[in-house]
Image: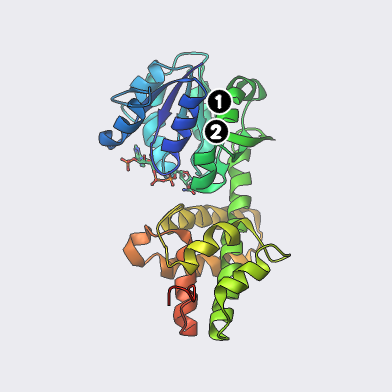
Amino acid sequence: MKIGFVGLGIMGKPMVKNLLEAGFDVTCYNRTASKVAEVVALGAKAADTPKAAAAASDVTITMVSDTPDVEEVILGPSGIIHGAKRGSIVVDMSTISPAATKEFAAALADKGVAMLDAPVSGGEKGAIEGTLTIMVGGPAEALETVMPAFMAMGKKVTHMGPSGSGQMTKLCNQIGCALTIQSFSEAFVLGAAAGLDLDKVFQAISGGAAGSWSMSNYGPKVLAGDFSPGFMVKLHQKDLKLVMEAARDLHVALPGTAVAQQLFAVAEKEEGGRLGNQSMIKPLEAMAGVKARSQKKQ
Ligand code: NAP
């Protein structure tokens, strides 16, 4: 199976490395061309446009930022739709609007190209280790074809149903991610205000009932004062905007998510939202007048 890959960001680059390691023939496009060199050195081919990446491939994967970006790389003037062969498959692994996903799938279907929405969870760590969770919407036959590639990038693949249902599942996932960050952040801030040793707080509670993926992976970064991104605040805000749009359309109240969105709105002021989403703790620290850092560093 020849794979085209569009988008070599924090997630895309390690995903490509895992595909190469599994023996796939991969042709990559990235908007900032310099980022392609690293994977070319590992055996990937470079393409000048998404169209060219698709023309060289049976399956073309997109891993870009937001809905308009996926639209551009699939339907734009040099988009995948102009290069993809009839019978080939497009797989969007970005997190974007479920409704727009259905429109992109319909446009591709008119050209005889199937589309899967296959957003992921597991963060940069999951992308590097090839342990991503993949939630898939779209035709089962296309999923069967793409499954070997998914197994090179992830561990758990769930077919959710028709086009858009993978993205809707990912929105459910993003509620959990936001609220578990908020949860451990509030715990750390209270512990800091009470003068507890936060390394010990982390040690004591991360393996118990309050533990979470977010606490285990982001907690140590917060304690070390490391706010570099695995997942940028601005991208998490993009997801919560989609969550709230879906909630409004479906007449569902998500009060916890609304609070998380407000905390991210404040965190987003710093460095244009390019810090990691663990920086949600910063507005909570500011309100409490404390810093939740390791005692060893202070
Ligand atoms: P990132 O590091 O910002 O990478 C984004 C990639 O998309 C870059 O390669 C960028 O190209 C490309 N891109 C953006 N807009 C484009 C456009 N209009 N045309 C062509 N290329 C474009 O983001 P990321 O963290 O890898 O996230 C990618 C997607 O995965 C997002 O939808 C995100 O929500 C989702 N996701 C992220 C994580 C995580 O932990 N990071 C986890 C799960 C899902 P340039 O290099 O030219 O900027």
Question: Marks 1 and 2, Cα distance to the nearest angstrom?
Answer: 7 Å
Q: Residue at x 60, y 63 (%)?
A: 179
Residue type (three-letter) at the residue carrying disc 2: Met
Which sits in the foreground, 231 or 31? 231
Residue 52 image-quadrant placement? top left
Q: Which residue was labeled with disc 2?
A: 153
| Residue 115 percent location from the top left of the image | 54, 27
Q: Which residue was labeled with disc 1?
A: 149
Q: Residue furthest front?
A: 296
The quadrant the C terminus occupies is bottom left
Which sits in the foreground, 226 or 203? 203
Assign a secondary structure to mark 1: helix
Which sits in the foreground, 257 or 233? 233
Decide if residue 2 is on the left or right side of residue 252: left
Residue 134 image-quadrant placement? top right
Label 2 environment density (alpha carbons within 10 Å; few <14, some 14–19, many ≥20): many
Quadrant of picture, ligand 1: top left
Note whether 74 is above or below 261 in the view shown. above
Whether pointer 1 and pointer 2 mark residues with C-beta atoms closer than 8 Å, the reply is yes
